[in-house]
Amino acid sequence: MLDIKLIRENPERVRNNLNRRGDAANLQMLDGLIKHDREWRRLLTRTNELRRKRRKITNEIAALKKAGKEINAQIEKGRKVDAEIDALEQQVGKQKQKAHYLLMRLPNLLHGSVPTGKGEEDNVGVRAWGKPPQFDFKPKNHLEIAKDLRLIDDERGAKVAGHGFLYLKGDLALLDLALQRFAIDFMVKKTHLLIEPPFMLRREPYEGVTDLADFENVMYKVENEDLYLIATAEHPLAALFMDEVLLQRDLPIKLVGVSPCFRKEVGAHGRYTKGLFRMHQFNKVEQFVFCLPDDSWNFHEELQQNAEELYQALGLHYKVVNVCTGDIGTVPAKRYDINVWMADGAYREAGSNSNCTDYQARRLNIRYREKEGQAPKGFVHTINNTALATSRIILALLEQNQEKDGSVNIPSVLAKHMNGLQKLEVH
RNA sequence: GCCGGGAUGGCAGAGUGGAUAAUGCGCAGGCCUUGAGAGCCUGUGGCCUUGUUGGCCACAUGGGUUCGAAUCCCAUUCCCGGCGCCA
């Protein structure tokens, strides 16, 4: 959510920023918001005047009654004002609702370094690490590899739960857990506090953390309950301090969450959906930071560094891109993606690092104060970044580390969590 | 799931149908002081408004009763206690 005061005082600055996204709908929403906000304030001022009148009458009634005098005339007068207030309040409510609806849908202001572009293809390369593996045989994709090793069962997954669900078996299930454990240990060493969050959230906190379209396209709702399965640990972590005022000396708060992630993936047609890449359920270790506004750009880079160290320790070849205006989404002010090399030569997203500035914090009402007893100073900033999403990392490991005989080398950093196992192979 | 108790400012805590939500702590500013502290004075939630020594709203949330609700009623959320169920 944007700051309505900024929009009132500096609409051109907001307009120019929204314009960078190249979507005229945003500018229309901005115009509508300004209009409804102005009308809301005008009507509110009038309502307040009526309320003042009404309160005066109430006080007169109290005084008359105390003096034992007739009050019926005053009561009648009060009823008339009540009717006026009721009518006006309905209009006030309508304007406020319209303004709020638009305010909740306007995207975050973009950082100056975000490149302009239409979609994924316009994201700008920042750096690459490692080189594409060279094979003297035709490399298989991860699904073929895992099936040949008899470590995955997608058919029975589809039988019991539908497309997008799989059974991981034996050492591959263990590899999933090993990756989680490896990422957690690494993040805890970086002074992040490990959190296992609720895997469901109520609607109210959920509206604070995400784009409203996600309720249709991403989240599973539990029937007859006000509960949604989380799409990522980012969401319960962000909502952790909803409606709270944090103390400056407790900031930054660095967390690492681990959870399964549930996603409907509506509208995924035509995108790469093979095997482990795009599933309705996967596991993820997530970095999250609450910090002072002045610090968020430093933490954005710090979390990026953390993620890349993890990939490097696993020996995975990847590229980092600065995500362009057409691909960045509603909430982030700036976003880096890490794209991993896959056996078909494409680089696909395995992790995503977003500085949401005060956009999430304002929606969730998470503020900070400089000292105990003082009034809140402002909203905190939030940054979220994948540490490791196990499914896509498994995919990359299988495809990048495959051998001619169909076996797959396991990175040595995982050995202690794999009972010393160095290779996935047919037993 | 059932029964009972509760939710008031940054915190503690009064207020059981009628004026400006008492008081204390904390915090901020001022006076005093070489400085600090103590003491004293003022301020301390949100929104609208620069007609400003202004107005409105706010006692968990949403409804209702009433001329008038922190106060009475209903629903919801959460917390505490007891019972039940359960890995």
Image (cartoon, grey):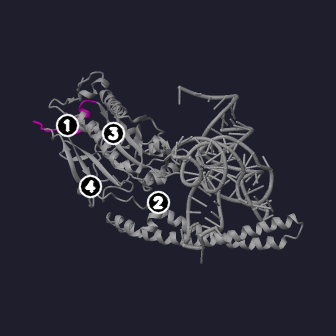
Secondary structure beneath dot 4 equals helix
Q: Is residue A225 visible?
A: no
Give the distance between the C-alpha atoms of the residues marked 2 and 4, in whole angstroms.
Answer: 25 Å
Region of the chain picked out in magenta, as a range: A134-150
Residue B38 locus on image (x, y percent): 62, 41
Give the distance between the C-alpha atoms of the residues marked 2 and 1, in whole angstroms.
Answer: 42 Å
Residue B60 locus on image (x, y percent): 63, 50
In this view, the residue in front, A271 or A147, is A271
For mark 1, what is the residue? A400
Residue A186 locus on image (x, y percent): 33, 32
Mark linked to residue A120: 4
| Image quadrant assignment for residue A150 | top left
Q: Residues within 10 Å of mark 4 (few under 14, many from 20)?
A: some
Mark 1 or mark 4, which is nearer the start of the sequence? 4
Question: Do the residues at discs 1 and 3 belong to one chain?
Answer: yes
Residue found 32% across the figure and 31% down from its top? A182
